Amino acid sequence: MSKIRSFEDLECFKFCKELRLDVADLVKAFPVSEQYRLIDQMIRCSRSITNNIAEGYGRFHFKENIQFCRVSRGSLYELLDHLQIALENQYIDTIKLTIIESKIETCLKLMNGYINYLTSKVNSNYASEPEPEYNIKTLTTPTLN
């Protein structure tokens, strides 16, 4: 298992980033009339998914990280609802919906696994959380020991 040096190394982030890119491509085919309605909402919630993973990681406290991951998980469910609306309005077909739903399911499983991991750290006998290491010269992201 490789060492996590950044939120970008997290499997849940990697898969959610792919989902975000898929959503950005998907909404390009939506009608212009949805530009500031459904398209905007889908783009915002797909970005919120990865944004919250990153922000939670940056807090360096397990409980705060868990809370941001829960918000991220909520955005995954919000995206599911937006996809249902897109299907109802015939902007996507059931095949596209099924493909994206499958990706969302994978993201949810990874997110839940990460939340469970963080929860186990909270519940462990550690007196305190590890301090992050900063490497200002190379501008790398903090790592937890």
Image (cartoon, grey):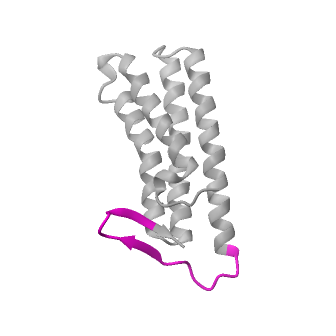
Q: 114 above or below 35?
A: below
Magenta-drawn stretch, dominant element (helix, strand or loop): loop
Is residue 127 found inside the magenta-colored segment of the image? yes
In this rendered view, identify the residue nearer to me: 41 or 65: 65
Q: 60 above or below 32?
A: below
Q: Is residue 96 left or right of residue 125?
A: left
Magenta range is 123-142
Kindly give the residue lying farthest to the front in the view shown.
Answer: 138
In this rendered view, identify the residue nearer to me: 3 or 11: 3
Q: 129 above or below 46?
A: below
Q: Position of residue 59 (x, y in %)?
A: 44, 68
Kindly give the residue lying farthest to the bottom in the view shown.
Answer: 127
Q: 1 above or below 142?
A: above
In this rendered view, identify the residue nearer to me: 7 or 81: 7
* Screen quadrant of the C terminus: bottom right
Q: Position of residue 17 (x, y in %)?
A: 47, 40
* Screen quadrant of the N terminus: bottom right
Q: Is residue 34 left or right of residue 76?
A: left
Q: Position of residue 75 (x, y in %)?
A: 50, 44
Q: For residue 115, what is the image quadrant?
A: bottom right
Q: Position of residue 135 (x, y in %)?
A: 36, 70
Evaluate whether residue 61 shows in this view.
yes
Evaluate whether residue 53 shows in this view.
no
Q: Is residue 17 left or right of residue 32?
A: right
